[in-house]
Image: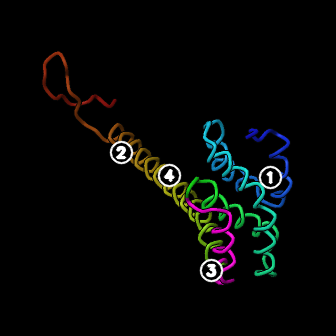
Amino acid sequence: MKKPGPEFWKPVGTLTSAMSPEDKVNLLSFIVPRFGSNSPEQELALEAFVTGLTPTFEVISAKCSEMSKADVQLLGTELLASEVLIPGRSTREEYALWLGSLSVAELEEILMKRKAVRTDASNDMVKMQEDRKAEEERKEAELQAYREQLEKARRERTMVFDEKTGTMVPIDKR
């Protein structure tokens, strides 16, 4: 079997043109590690992935006519990658039957869960940044209070430690 070359993968870029760059990078994280395995089964799985894109998008678009093109592509690539890219998991026929049996609600739920990963990560990042800023403000306030306490002590102290005698002596404030 001939290994898929760049011309073989050109349709993947074209067929996923509506996907966000982040989603494309995620897709590549599924595909790229599967190259160079020298496994005929993996090569067939890669070919099944590429040739399955258009039919998958067509089925999803037909079922979910209100879904955006980007969402159709995201959902389709996620479903294909999870079922077809792993040799022995699903054949083309099994995948097609499974995809055909999914309801609109199930497809939307899968998409919602997939999108929730990014939303949750964004929310977690915002929270982490807010927590970091609050911690920095707390430390700065603590440091400022310490500085003010030192300044007040310098102004109001009446005694100082004399290193020569090892005793506290009154400060001469003339």
Range of residues picked out in magenta: 89-107
- Label ID, residue 106: 3
- Label ID, residue 132: 4
At label 3, which amino acid type do we have?
Glu
Which is nearer the N-term, disc 1 or disc 2? 1
Residue 79 picture quarter: bottom right
Label 1 crowding class (10 Å Cα cut-off): few <14, some 14-19, many 20+? some
Percent x, y for residue 136? 48, 49
> Do tag 4 and tag 3 residues touch (Cβ < 8 Å)?
no
Q: Does the segment drawn in magenta span residue 91?
A: yes
The residues bearing labels 4 and 2 have C-alpha atoms spaced at a distance of: 26 Å
Q: Secondary structure at mark 2?
A: helix
Q: Which one is in front, 164 or 16? A: 16
Percent x, y for residue 34? 63, 43
Q: Secondary structure at mark 4?
A: helix
The correct choice, above or below, for 104 with respect to 138 in the image is below
Q: Which residue is mark 2?
A: 149
